[in-house]
Each structure stands twice: as C-alpha cells, then as structure tokens.
Image: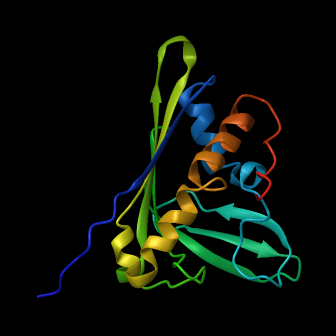
C-alpha cells in the first residue's frame, strides 16, 4: 500500500468590484492581459503571449517569440461564469510533466456579492501528486509572486486598472 502525504491546499480569495461574468471573462478569455510574462517555464525563452482554451480538454500554455509552445495546464471543467478547474502540470523543479498522475488541480470560482461585486476564490489542491517536489512547489505558489498576487492582477484588469508589477525580490 502506498502512503500519500497530505499537503494543505493553497487557497486565496479576493473581492472584486466587478460582476462574476466580467471576472470570469478576464480570468479565462483575457488570460494574457494579467498573467505576467515573467511567469513561464524555461530560462532561455521570451514569451509573446499566454493562451487558455476555454473548454474541457483545452490547453493552458505560453507561446515564445520563436513560436515555441509550452503547455503547463489543461482545462478539466469550465462552467461560465462561475467556475474553472484546471490541471497544473508544473512540477516542483519548475519543469512540466503531462502525466495525469503527476498533476495537481486549480479551481477558481466566481461568486456574486452585493452591489455587483464578486468573490473570487482560487484553491490549488492535490499537491501531493507532485511527489518529492510538492513542498517546494507549494512554497512557490503560496509566496509573494504566487496565486495571491496573480488573482490580484486579474482583479486589477477586471476593475479596469493595469495589472500591478511583480513584487521586487528581497
């Protein structure tokens, strides 16, 4: 019998001054407007765009200036404008493994609040599937440039502001 180590999910929430449909559209259809180009796999690549294909089985990937693509996620479920679930293929050593047994899951929900606002909740779970690198991966996605920062950038765009810059490393 294989023992599975439990690793707590990374959960981040933010209230956004925009309706759920706007928040969902920005997160999914305008992914390229808020995901920072510095967040990509491979040191020797300059990224020209990020893409999220909005259907179950759709790829989440970046395209570099030479036309190369790197798929680092796969849409598992999508229910506009309230939910997106995708597989995270990035491992603890910041490489990509498309094996479903090695992927964690990211669920983003968009819940209406009073006055046309939205509660965006992101939960990155099943981190144990990344094996030995899971703890390091969790540290990276929960840190200063991780999911909390990323959903704040999406909120900026949904509220009509430019996305804030990456935090300066200490």
Q: Going 60% across and 79% down the picture, which residue do you hit?
A: 94
Q: Is residue 100 left or right of residue 147?
A: left
Q: Quadrant of the N terminus?
A: bottom left
Question: In the image, is residue 138 above or below residue 97?
Answer: above
Towards the viewer: 19 or 142: 142
Q: Is residue 136 left or right of residue 149?
A: left
Q: Is residue 27 left or right of residue 100?
A: right
Q: Position of residue 101 (x, y in %)?
A: 35, 82
Question: In the image, is residue 90 above or below residue 143?
Answer: below
Towards the viewer: 132 or 99: 132
Answer whether residue 79 is visible to the viewer in this image: no
Q: Going 52% across and 79% down the picture, which residue do you hit?
A: 91
Q: Quadrant of the C terminus?
A: bottom right
Q: Position of residue 126 (x, y in %)?
A: 34, 66
Answer whether residue 15 is visible to the viewer in this image: yes
Towards the viewer: 73 or 123: 123
Towards the viewer: 146 or 97: 146
């Amino acid at each position: 019998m294989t023992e599975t180590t439990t690793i707590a999910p990374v959960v981040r929430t933010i209230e956004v001054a925009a309706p759920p449909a706007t928040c969902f559209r920005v997160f999914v259809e305008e992914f390229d407007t808020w995901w920072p180009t510095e967040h990509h796999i491979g040191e020797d690549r300059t990224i020209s765009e990020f893409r999220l294909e909005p259907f179950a089985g759709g790829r989440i990937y970046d395209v570099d200036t030479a036309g190369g693509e790197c798929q680092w996620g796969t849409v598992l479920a999508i229910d506009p404008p309230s939910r997106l679930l995708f597989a995270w293929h990035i491992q603890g050593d910041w490489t990509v493994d498309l094996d479903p047994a090695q992927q964690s899951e990211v669920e983003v929900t968009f819940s209406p609040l009073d006055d046309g606002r939205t509660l965006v909740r992101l939960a990155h779970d099943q981190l144990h599937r990344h094996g030995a690198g899971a703890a390091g991966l969790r540290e990276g996605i929960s840190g200063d440039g991780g999911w909390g920062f990323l959903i704040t950038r999406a909120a900026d765009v949904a509220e009509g502001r430019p996305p804030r810059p990456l935090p300066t490393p200490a």
